[in-house]
Image: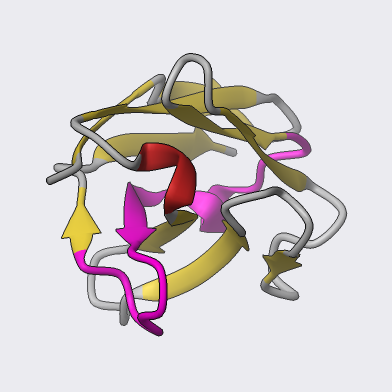
Amino acid sequence: QVQLVESGGGLVQAGGSLRLSCAASGRFFSTYTMGWFRQAPGKVHEFLTSISWNGDNIYYADSVKGRFTISRDDAKSTVYLQMNSLKPEDTAVYYCAATPPSESRPRIWGQGTQVTVSS
């Protein structure tokens, strides 16, 4: 069973950058599709981006396309989210999630890390 721990959140000014990390423990990380989601107060859970097990398939929500970049390092069992040109509306709790092979939805979630963008 994979377990996920996010880090790298914090307070940043609009226009700034942050890089989130999601460290996985357990076996089979390299076989999982990994993704990032966020939830702002009073808003629904929002998909941001995902990367397939081999890195061949990457998807971004329109809200972050061109500003955020997902990557993975299987040797470190870690997935990253590089966030550039941050906006106040990016303020949210950010979660990483793991989707096992042959499944269509994430099964494993991290505890979340807060990102706050000041104007």
**Residue visible at 48% across and 72% down in the picture:** 47
- In terms of image quadrants, where is residue 37? bottom left
Which residue is more in the foreground, 96 or 8? 96
Residue 5 located left or right of residue 9:
left
The answer to whether residue 94 is magenta is yes
Which residue is more in the foreground, 93 or 72? 72
Residue 53 vertical position relative to residue 73 in the rendered view, above or below: below
Residue 71 located left or right of residue 95:
right
Residue 61 vertical position relative to residue 86 in the rendered view, above or below: below
- In terms of image quadrants, where is residue 26? top left
Q: Residue furthest right?
A: 66
Q: In the image, residue 96 lies at what x, y percent? A: 36, 48
**Residue visible at 51% across and 35% down in the picture:** 118
Residue 76 located left or right of residue 7:
right
**Residue visible at 56% across and 64% down in the picture:** 48
**Residue visible at 23% across and 76% down in the picture:** 42
Which residue is more in the foreground, 97 or 63? 97
Color encoding of the figure: secondary structure
Q: In the image, residue 67 lies at what x, y percent? A: 80, 47
Residue 105 vertical position relative to residue 92 in the rendered view, above or below: below
Which residue is more in the foreground, 35 or 26? 26
Q: In the image, residue 116 lies at what x, y percent? A: 41, 36
The answer to whether residue 3 is magenta is no
Q: Which quadrant holds the C terminus?
A: top right
Q: In the image, residue 87 lies at what x, y percent? A: 65, 47
Q: Which residues are magenta?
A: 84-107
